[in-house]
Image: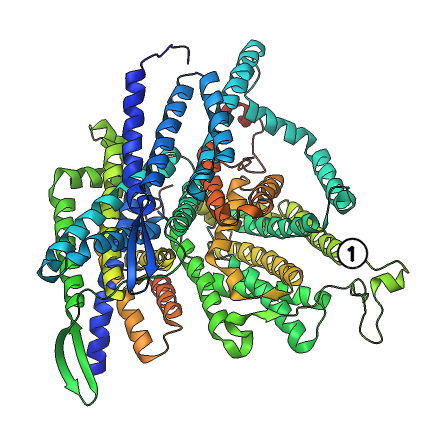
Amino acid sequence: MASQPQDWSATLKESAITAAIAAALMFPMIGLYTSTRAGGLAIETRWIELAIGVLLIFLGRIALIRLRDGERLVPFVGGVFAVGLGLQLPLPNGLLTVCCIAGGAVVVLRSVVLWVGGKLKATNDARNSPPLAARAQLFLKQYGPWLGAAVIAFAIAFPWLPFADRRLIDLATLVLIYVMLGWGLNIVVGLAGLLDLGYVAFYAIGAYSFALLSSNYDMSFWACLPVAAMLAAFLGILLGFPVLRLRGDYLAIVTLGFGEMIRIILINWVDFTKGPDGISGIPKPTLFGLSFSRRPPEGTESFHQFFDIPYASVDRIIFLFYVALGLALLTNAFILRIRKLPIGRAWEALREDEIACRSLGLNPTNIKLSAFALGAMFGGLAGAVFAARQSFISPESFTFIESAIILAVVVLGGMGSQIGVAIAAILLIGLPEWFRELQDYRMLAFGALMVAIMVWRPKGILSFREPTLRLHEEDRGAKQ
Amino acid sequence: MEYFLQQLINGVTLGAIYGLIAIGYTMVYGIIGMINFAHGEIFMIGAFISLISFLILGPSGGAMVPIALLVVLLIAMSLTAVYGWALERIAYRPLRGSPRLAALISAIGMSIILQNYVQLSQGARVKTLQPVIEGGFQLMKAGNFTVVLSYMQIIIVVVTVSLMAVFWTVITKTALGRAQRACEQDRTMAALLGIDVDRTISITFILGAALAAVAGMMVTLYYGVIDFYVGFLAGIKAFTADVLGGIGSIPGAMLGGLLIGLIEAFWSGYFSIEYKDVAAFSILVLVLVFRPSGLLGRPEVEKV
């Protein structure tokens, strides 16, 4: 850090190597384009795009090297310049524009972090206090309950805040669904330590059981909810039974296969599930029989008629938000309680050491099965809420990528931490949805975010993966 | 009988392709113990690179086709290898030594990035290539049904088998292979004995990517249809093949690939084509119930 590297030739050499590799990477994909013409495919060239791309990588690499050497001002200015350039100059390709802006932003961010971090470090050394992350954890431990209450209060007040419009509340409902899914999967992955890559299967089962029961038997949302949860849990047991002897990655691939199987069955069993067309017209939940439509069917009353208030279509969305919030809070309370019960302790013990558990007389299969079933149950609940929110579902919504997103929510949140999962869900679901204008680049940004957070904080945003109980409390100080 | 023979031929061809992809997975798993989820995407990139380079070289046509194909193969292998190397360097190396799930999430993220990168740069449309090598031997004839062994199928199987033989020699006979096997057993010890672990891991990724590129080229020429999404299913199938054969074992990957290919071909030939993936996964579950570490895998030894 303190060294004054003015060795520009080394920097340039390193950057040139990076740029050469980038050129090799981008040449076939960016430099050449296969366009479909009459009579087959043809190749078009895009040399300008390629050149700009390579140049951007070259400059970015220089900036990063300078940052590594402890220089802040020049990369900062360069990054700001790149962002401005990306915003102003019409580059020939949208991808390049996005990369230019994002790259510039990263450089700016890193120089700011370096600057702030350097300052913090200086004050920390002076006071001899623990590093930032540890302090954040300590803070959470001390004020956790208060923080939780504040978050819940904010969530309850959320639809009435001035900036909350229709779209935002709807988005918040989606985030809550993912929070629920994340907490459910957290039981399996975070607490019991079983890697499940097919969680979306239970989500799909929940959604489809609500959709099918309501469209075939006219059952209401509230009657379907427990059925959906139970069906999902039952399926969890059914799947778990044969495969829970498997370890680690074998389990992962079997669960992944299971998720794909459910999707393929949903697509192909057309008589039952209506196949790829999906099911539409799924009813919205009611409040004790009061529907939220403008003109309720004969003999029933709707919410605005009963309370004698003017009809507002946003009411329905707000109500759904509260339903999701209520279920999410229920999930949270359930998990927090069950972690303190013997079964919850047994999950964590099993995660830490299976052999020790077996020698202490715990039955690993039953314990794993219960984790699997409970995780599946919450997946089913979330699925029912999802179906109610969309009022249309199709197998398209339950692809592997969905499982990956839920798993990412859990892992990024720092497995085992409830609030971490919630933060990760907001970050991963809320942010990309917010940037809907960027449509095509949304998934690209999503993937980049996943990689970046993992490289930056491999243990998750808030990592709490430590046993809830310790035999000797004083051990903790010694170990850290 | 004739029908059976035809499905057998198709199954072996498919199995050869799966096997090539599966080796990349299993090598990476053996050496750093992670599921390289983006490997299917590397295969897809290999398919695209070979499509593009074939479109450039193809029109020279005529008697030059075999040479053109060879050049395409080399280009695809080398450029895809760069992708494999960069993948490891960017997304996995910083995560070495961190929890395994972190590396898995990073791999899934990388797979999403690569998929969308190709979709954005090459378009979401399906790319169709005119068949390059047509014709084949007619082996048998029974009524209306003719058993055909196409030239393309012969090429696929021959190329696969010879590449696997070369690869096997590299692993078992050369210094590089020894270094790889040493890293597989104990990375720290290998480093202490003077093996450059980083370099060995990089080379593993490069080799895996090159083999995936071959598979990508085969698929491009055999089916003639690719899009940015082909990597996902092929990757999952190849990984299933690995687990079936016992993950971490290279002969297991070849065997598993062959089995998955055969299962798929026979299931779609005799039962229903829609449920062929369900069949493959079900057989995987069945095998794992009775042999929890795959067909050729070593059972994991638990040490307390």
Per the image, the residue denoted by label 1 is A315
From this viewpoint, is residue A421 visible?
yes
Answer with left or right where residue A275 lies relative to residue B212. right
Q: Residue at x 59, y 52 (%)?
A: A181
- Please name whichever residue, A349 or A11, is drawn nearer the observer in this view of the structure: A11
Answer with left or right where residue A67 lies relative to residue A227. left
Place of residue B183 in the rendered image (x, y in percent of width and height, measured from the top left): 25, 37
Amino acid type, label 1: Asp
Place of residue B266 in the rendered image (x, y in percent of width and height, measured from the top left): 29, 75
- Please name whichever residue, A1 or B55, is drawn nearer the observer in this view of the structure: B55
Q: Secondary structure at mark 1?
A: helix
Answer with left or right where residue A119 lies relative to residue B290. right
Picture quadrant of residue A472: top right
Q: Residue at x 51, y 34 (%)?
A: A88
Q: Residue at x 20, y 47 (%)?
A: B75
Place of residue B175 in the rendered image (x, y in percent of width and height, measured from the top left): 13, 37
From this viewpoint, is residue B253 visible?
no
Q: Residue at x 37, y 77 (%)?
A: B272
